[in-house]
């Protein structure tokens, strides 16, 4: 190659290199950065539901245990704490364990942070009615249930041979008043005697069956024996006005009440404070059973005839089925207080007093 051509090639290479050196460098890839944004706030949690409780009370039911008479209206009242506006409660009614009615009732404010509701119900059949209440959850108030309450429904017309829940209720009410009565649900002779004693105490006709008047007296708390001589401690009281005999424990607590028949007007029972001086078990020649003598021939004893009125010869007759229990409780020396509010009886001791 000639020297001239060599120089020309070298010049071309130098120009190419110069151009390459002056060219901009290739761009380096960069990450895309989004503009800053405002964070989205999370939805606020719902306000915490208020916990609550329901207390049920049966109204217009009376007695021990509470009862209503078949066909009469009872009222179930519910107290809700705390009160939250716009809430409802579901009340279910059961009779003998079977659901008979369901109601949704509104809770109304009564002040002091509490609410209440009422429902009425009447059952024409005897048995047990139970009420249950529950509040289902809402956004404003949590779910909660109330206590259940029950009430007995009684058929008032009962007589010998009847049996079932109404008889059991009758016996329970009489027993709570200390009348001596079985708790077997059968209207037997013993139940009839207790009914007669109750009727005597409440001024009703002295028969052994029951009716609406008897059950109303029970609801009203009638038939309570008021001890006249509590200072006598463990003693017997014979109320000649009402023709009942009472065993009294120390402190003036009634232990047992029995129907009795005292001395008729021609042979009245002596009135006063005495004490048992002699006891004779079994039946004597005059038909006196398990006798407890408190002065001369006057005694508390069983007898075959115990009318609903005063009919004895001065003694205090009690039904023979009750005589053994009374004999076992009365001790020698037990005080016996005999009185008559209506002014009958006698303060003179008759030497010929008898059964």
Image: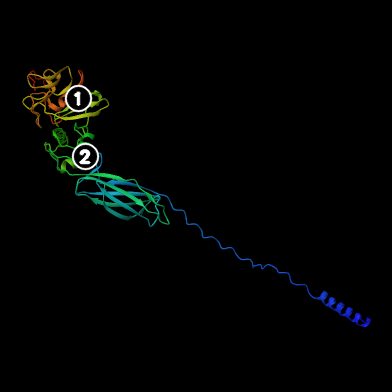
Q: Which mark is residue 236?
A: 1
| Residue where numbered disc 2 is placed | 169
Percent position of residue 199, x then y: 15, 36
Front residue of 316 and 321: 321
Percent position of residue 316, x then y: 12, 25
Q: Quadrant of residue 33?
A: bottom right
Front residue of 31 and 137: 31
Horizontal relation, residue 4 to residue 312: left or right: right
Which residue appears at 28% of the width and 52% of the height? 119
Q: Secondary structure at mark 1?
A: strand
Horizontal relation, residue 323 to residue 49: left or right: left
Question: Please, is residue 238 above or below residue 167 in the view?
Answer: above
Q: Which mark is residue 174?
A: none
Q: Quadrant of residue 6?
A: bottom right
For this orientation, the residue located farthest to the right is 3
Q: Secondary structure at mark 2?
A: helix
Which image quarter holds the C terminus?
A: top left
Mark 1 or mark 2: which comes first in sequence? 2
Front residue of 267 and 249: 249
Horizontal relation, residue 264 to residue 258: left or right: left
Find the distance from the CA under tag 1 to the CA under tag 2: 28 Å
**How many numbered circles are shown?**
2
Percent position of residue 301, x then y: 13, 23
Q: Is residue 229 in view?
A: no
Question: Please, is residue 118 above or below residue 283 in the view?
Answer: below
């Amino acid at each position: 190659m000639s020297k001239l051509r060599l120089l020309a090639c070298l010049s071309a290479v130098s120009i190419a290199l110069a151009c390459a050196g002056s060219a901009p460098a290739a761009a380096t890839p960069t990450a895309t950065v989004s503009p800053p944004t405002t964070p989205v706030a999370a939805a606020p949690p719902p306000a915490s539901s208020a916990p609550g409780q329901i207390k049920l009370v049966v109204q217009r039911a009376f007695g021990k245990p509470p009862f209503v008479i078949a066909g009469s209206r009872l009222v179930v009242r519910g107290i809700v704490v705390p009160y939250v506006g716009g809430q409802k409660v579901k009340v279910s009614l059961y009779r003998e364990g079977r659901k008979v009615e369901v109601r949704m009732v509104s809770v109304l404010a009564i002040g002091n942070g509490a609410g209440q509701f009422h429902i009425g119900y009447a059952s024409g059949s005897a048995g047990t009615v139970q009420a249950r209440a529950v509040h289902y959850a809402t956004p404003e108030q949590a779910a909660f249930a109330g206590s259940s309450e029950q009430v007995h429904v009684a058929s008032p017309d009962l007589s010998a041979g009847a049996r079932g829940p109404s008889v059991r209720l009758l016996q329970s009410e009489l027993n709570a008043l200390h009348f001596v009565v079985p708790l077997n649900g059968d209207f037997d002779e013993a139940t009839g005697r207790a009914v007669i004693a109750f009727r005597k105490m409440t001024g009703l006709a002295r028969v052994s069956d029951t009716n609406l008047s008897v059950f109303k007296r029970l609801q009203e708390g009638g038939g309570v024996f008021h001890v006249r001589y509590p200072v006598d401690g463990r003693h017997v009281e014979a109320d000649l006005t009402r023709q009942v005999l009472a065993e009294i424990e120390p402190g003036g607590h009634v232990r047992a009440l029995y129907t009795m028949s005292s001395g008729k007007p021609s042979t009245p029972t002596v009135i006063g404070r005495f004490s048992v001086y002699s006891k004779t078990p079994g039946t004597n020649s005059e038909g006196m059973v398990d006798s407890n003598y408190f002065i001369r021939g006057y005694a508390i004893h069983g007898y075959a005839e115990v009318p609903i009125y005063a009919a004895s010869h001065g003694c205090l007759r009690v039904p023979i089925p009750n005589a053994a229990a009374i004999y076992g409780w009365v001790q020698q020396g037990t005080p016996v207080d005999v009185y008559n509010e209506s002014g009958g009886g006698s303060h003179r001791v008759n030497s010929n007093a008898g059964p």
